[in-house]
Amino acid sequence: MGVASQLPPEFIVRVDRERCIRCKRCVVNCGFGALDFRNGVVSDDTKCVACQRCTVVCPERAITIEENRLAYKANAYWTPLARKNILKQAETGGMLLTGMGNDNPYPVYWDHLLIDACQVTNPSIDPLREPMELRTYLGRKPDALSFDLATMIGPQIKLDTPIVFAPMSFGSISLNAHLALARAAQAAGTVMNTGEGGLHKDLYSYGDHIIVQVASGRFGVHSAYLNQGVAVEIKIGQGAKPGIGGHLPGEKVPLEISETRMVPQGTDCLSPAPHHDIYSIEDLSQLIYAIKEATGYSKPVSVKIAAVHNVAAIASGIVRAGADILYIDGFRGGTGAAPTIIRDHVGIPIELALAAVDDRLRQEGIRNQASIIVSGGIRHSGDVAKAIALGADAVAIGTAALVAMGCRICQKCYTNNCSWGIATQRPELVKRLDPDEATEHLVNLLRAWSLELKEILGSLGVNAIESLRGSRERLRGVGLDAQTLEILGVKSAGR
Amino acid sequence: MDQVFPRIPSGCAISGMIDRSGGRMTGEAIIASIALMHERSNGLGGGFAGYGIYPDFPEHYAFHLIYDSETARANTEAFLASRFAIDASEPIPTRPVAGILDPPILWRYFLAPKEELVHGKDRPADADDFTLRAVMHINHSIAGAYVASSGKNMGAFKGVGYPEDIGRFYRLETYAGYSWTAHGRFPTNTPGWWGGAHPFTILDWSVVHNGEISSYGINRRYLEMFGYTCDLQTDTEVVAYLFDLLGRRHGLKFQEICLALAAPFWKDIDRMPEPARQKLTAIRMVYGSALLNGPFSIIVGNRRGITGFNDRIKLRPMMAARKGDMVYMASEESAIIEVCSSPDEVWAARGGEPIVAELYDNAARKIARAS
């Protein structure tokens, strides 16, 4: 951007000069180059993204970041964001990019759903005194068991808690972040997901807790990789950018990424919008079975799609095509980089998509043929419980996991400047993320949410997660219209 | 049917008894047993199921119908006639009893499915499935008609009132069966209708239940996937259908069904020797949506016998006793002692562990031969 930019800074950095001890830690820590030292700390506010790194590392708490509120005169229709985006595009002629999930004020259906509890007629159960079971198996289940014929149950992923880590590629996030996710998955009895960038060889030993992904760019996909994980996932789309491919710029492809992705160093990694061998549902079925052949039918195959308008019919097709796990990512789902206009305006909320898909699969009598994982904005264990009650087998958390590792959701993942060492490949930034500490935080988060889930189950008077799964009778809606209630399959509060 | 309160949580008393040698007893003992637990009911529902009570029609589906009106009866009979040969049709004999107010029209039919319809194009080629669909149709689609029972050589007798009054109302002393179950109801919310009393039945499965099924929501949605509709405003209904699905259609044994519906905890399964561990893991994987959760004690009957079982952490009472060929189960030991003063053995049912009492093989063969 030239000097002639008309864009006012979004944030203002205030340094309390009396408290500042001139240690320059903030200057060193700013991944975006917004701070400099010229006889004291000075800021280039236009570069500040409010990632809060400087405020946290300052030993004197001398720095505060403020919103530049009057950069644009108030207008309820022409919001500051709308004007800023037009100015940017007028100056550059480019598509606007962003990171993380849709941050616009669309309805949040989770916040219109409330959970039931026991009173008198059935006793609630104290999870501190009684067993409370969260164990979940993901994968295809037969309609019925026949002991005489020794029904074969297909391969399953065993989870100690119905929460998995969402796919985030090595490339979009750092090796230390990937390592922390893998270690935490192992420690917490769940799984992480490679995303589309392959699996670094140092992480192969965590394979029992990793879902390996095959996306349209096929980066890092080879036989050993497919067989290293506990399941293989075909990524068709993601909630932040349905129908859009991916682009890892060459600057983010240093040696280790090039080796893992099997591309020359410094090359752009372009993931096509569609898989070029999948132009219809029968092509998907071929890829599913090609992967099953390549892995000796020893691993469940997952198919990940974005929640789009016709998601129920698509899901049905995917299950009938042979998928053992159906992964649906809602429009709040995160991304390392996406065109802002797509992220903010394409796709549908995961709550509605999940309800529609679960209903559809049940109507067709095939719900047991695939497990459902949902993601896209799961913020706390209340969201997890509601998702499971709507019909999910498990939820995936991406943004929440990143926040646990230190992310402040500044939404600048695509810049390679992440001051927290998460969404960056710059070695001096990557090393800031201590994998041991990040692992501990992730394990803590899963432990805390699992404890809360057990409290919720206990208050519902049930002691196994499968008694909540799909039990929409235990949910009520508040402030929802009749049709939304019908789609969600829940009654209004008071009924 | 008013759908505003689709599920009625309730407390209750249950009792059951079986002569494993196939000897038949009148309904007097089961009335005496359930009557002793009067305090556990509140007069808003009582009922009985008897097995082996229709030796003259052993191979007919015995339909007990509850009608709100003659119109409902006419509509139902027209429907039944279109699908079954009606080999007998009569009012269910009753006597006036103080405390039984305003009874509905009670009728029974002995039905044989029309062969050409059972095996017709696009029809389930199974008489049981054919009959089950007919029951679902009546309960779901014919206003004011409700099937109280539909099994062979068995019947359910139920209504609004204390169970001992219901038993005398239905003249149960005039029937003789090799097994009986009974229920006294303490509903916490009720539209007070006769169809809402226990037992709940489908084909020859009957269920009496004390407690609440907190997993009702998913149990119901699971059953809907297999063509069962839950219209009866109670959680107990799902238990009967789950037994039918797992027992009759999936071919699981009594013991295995109970292991699915009140499954052991993972912590116990993980310590089991093979192949038990593998089997239980498979049951929980496949039948997770059938797991019954919440406080309950249940007695399930079918032509082979009765099974009593509790929820996994035993939040409802259940005692059992044996005397010779007789096996008894009830909410309270006193209800057993009332009809069997010196049992050989008395024990408390353990959480999640079924007590299965079936006819001896030779008795079952004899009963089957007689038909």
Image: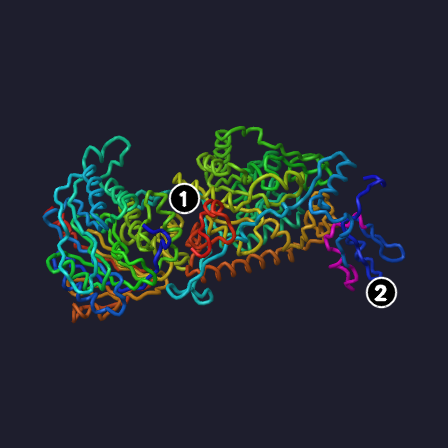
Whether the magenta-drawn stretch holds residue B309 is answered as no
Q: Residue at x 27, y 36 (%)?
A: B124
| Percent position of residue B79, x then y | 22, 40
Residue A480 visible to an observer of this rendering = yes
Q: Which residue is disc 2 drawn over? A: A18
Q: Amino acid at mark 2?
A: Glu
Q: Residue at x 49, y 40 (%)?
A: A301
Where residue A130 sits, quadrant-wise, is: bottom left
Q: Residue at x 28, y 42 (%)?
A: B137
In the image, which residues are magenta?
A45-63
Disc 2 crowd, CA 10 A, few/some/many (<14, 14-19, 20+): few
Disc 1 crowd, CA 10 A, few/some/many (<14, 14-19, 20+): many
| Percent position of residue B371, x then y | 11, 46
In this rendering, the count of numbered labels is 2
- In this rendering, is residue B120 above or below B326? above
Residue closer to the observer: B332 or A170: B332
Q: Residue furthest right?
A: A39
